[in-house]
Image (cartoon, helix red, strand yellow):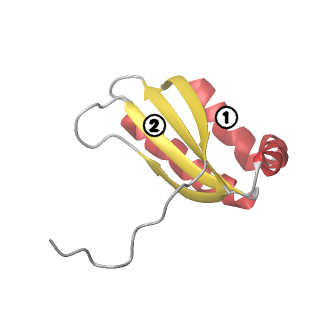
Amino acid sequence: MITCFIRYDLAPFRQEEFAKYAQMWGQAIPACGANLIGYYGPHEGSLTTAYGVYTLESLAAYEAYRARLKASEAGRAAYAFARKEGFIRREDRIFLTKLSEPHTELVHA
């Protein structure tokens, strides 16, 4: 299992546009085969940083997912919305593998 973390650098004062964009992906990503963890927008601190997070079985599964996403009506609509509105200044992806789970036993000091 791999987790894709997308870091977005947003134009200032464009959080509402990003929220709409996140809702669009909330429909498109699961429909195209990835497990969406969620989109996270600015709340406190930096008002120009946001994240999207989803998981897939492998990088091969990611490539197939991306092809389905680009071919889907919902995916094309989200890409077009972002291009038209211009609220994303930069987008970076990183793929990570989970290395640990929370420890289930209580630790007493």
- Give percent across and percent down for residue 39: 48, 49
The structure residue drawn at horizontal position 34% and vertical position 23%, both measured from the top left corner, is 12
- Image quadrant where residue 35 sits: bottom right
Q: Residue furthest bottom?
A: 105
Which is nearer the eye, 58 or 12? 58
* Image location of residue 63, percent across then percent down: 82, 43
Q: Is residue 26 left or right of residue 49?
A: right
- Residue drawn at x 19%, y 76% is 108
Residue 79 image label:
1
For mark 1, give the secondary structure: helix
Instruction: Name the residue located 79 percent from the left edge and 49 percent from the top edge.
Output: 65
Near-viewer residue (99 or 88): 99
Extreme residue toward the front, this view:
109
Residue 25: % across, % down: 61, 49
Which quadrant does the N terminus fall into? bottom right
Kindly identify the amino acid type of the residue bearing the numbered disc 1: Tyr
